């Protein structure tokens, strides 16, 4: 009966959750940084004094990667070779990693598109800065939702019974 609950391949799904959280959220952050960076590079040739205020989308993109890092460290902390690991725990960790990673991709994509467009508009009209920050916050919240769901799912794993 213990082999049915805790097969030897169960940790694979937990580690897949670790990888999903880290890889996908980092891809989203990289896209957001690259796309916003293109707009900042364009802005810098016209108005170099506005570059520092235009770095907000890049910083917010980096926060998306931190969400994936937090989730992956929490999931990896639950994986111990000496402890039994159920198949249900593996699937919950996979779901937690995917929820954080996929929302990280969405948030990074949104931050990149908004950051690029708003930074280019910021060259011509500086009053757009507050609107840009507000839209970026709403885009960032997408990643935060995935982090919250992943944290809730990770707390459910502790309530699962062992394999014996």
Image (cartoon, rainbow, N blue to C red):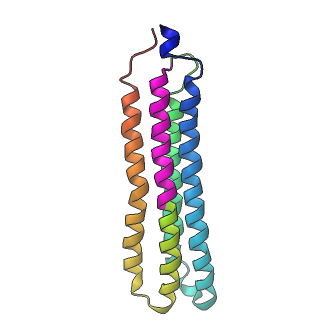
* Apparent side of residue 1 relative to residue 26 in the rendered image (left or right): left
* Apparent side of residue 143 relative to residue 26 in the rendered image (left or right): left
Q: Position of residue 76 (x, y in %)?
A: 54, 33
In the image, residue 50 lies in the stretch drawn in magenta: no
Camera-nearest residue between 94 and 36:
94
User: Which residue is drawn at the image coordinates 58% and 33% (left, top)?
Assistant: 15
- The region drawn magenta spans 85-107
- For the image, the number of numbered tags is 0
Q: Position of residue 159 (x, y in %)?
A: 35, 23
The C terminus lies in quadrant = top left
Q: Which quadrant of the view contains residue 49?
A: bottom right
In the rendered image, the vertical position of residue 156 relative to residue 30, given as above or below? above
User: Which residue is drawn at the image coordinates 56% and 72% (left, top)?
Assistant: 36
In the image, residue 87 lies in the stretch drawn in magenta: yes
* Apparent side of residue 10 relative to residue 132 in the rendered image (left or right): right
Q: Position of residue 24 (x, y in %)?
A: 56, 50
User: Which residue is drawn at the image coordinates 39% and 17% (left, top)?
Assistant: 161
Q: Position of residue 89 (x, y in %)?
A: 46, 26
Q: State whether the magenta stretch is mostly helix, strand or loop.
A: helix
In the rendered image, the vertical position of residue 16 relative to residue 55, given as above or below? above
In the rendered image, the vertical position of residue 129 relative to residue 94, given as above or below? below
User: Which residue is drawn at the image coordinates 41% and 34% (left, top)?
Assistant: 154
Camera-nearest residue between 82 and 146:
146
């Amino acid at each position: 009966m213990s082999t049915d609950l805790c097969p030897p391949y169960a940790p694979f799904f937990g580690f897949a959750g670790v990888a999903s959280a880290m890889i996908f959220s980092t891809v989203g952050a990289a896209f957001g940084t690259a796309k916003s960076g293109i707009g900042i590079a364009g802005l810098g040739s016209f108005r170099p004094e506005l570059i520092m205020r235009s770095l907000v989308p890049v910083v917010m993109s980096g926060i998306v990667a931190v969400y994936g890092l937090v989730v992956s460290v929490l999931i990896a902390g639950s994986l111990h070779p000496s402890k039994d690991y159920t198949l249900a725990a593996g699937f919950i960790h996979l779901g937690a990693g995917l929820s954080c990673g996929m929302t990280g991709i969405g948030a990074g994509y949104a931050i990149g598109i908004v950051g690029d467009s708003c930074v280019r508009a910021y060259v011509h009209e500086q009053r757009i800065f507050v609107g840009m920050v507000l839209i970026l916050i709403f885009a960032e919240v997408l990643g935060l939702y995935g982090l919250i769901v992943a944290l809730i799912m990770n707390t459910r794993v502790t309530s699962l019974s062992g394999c014996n």
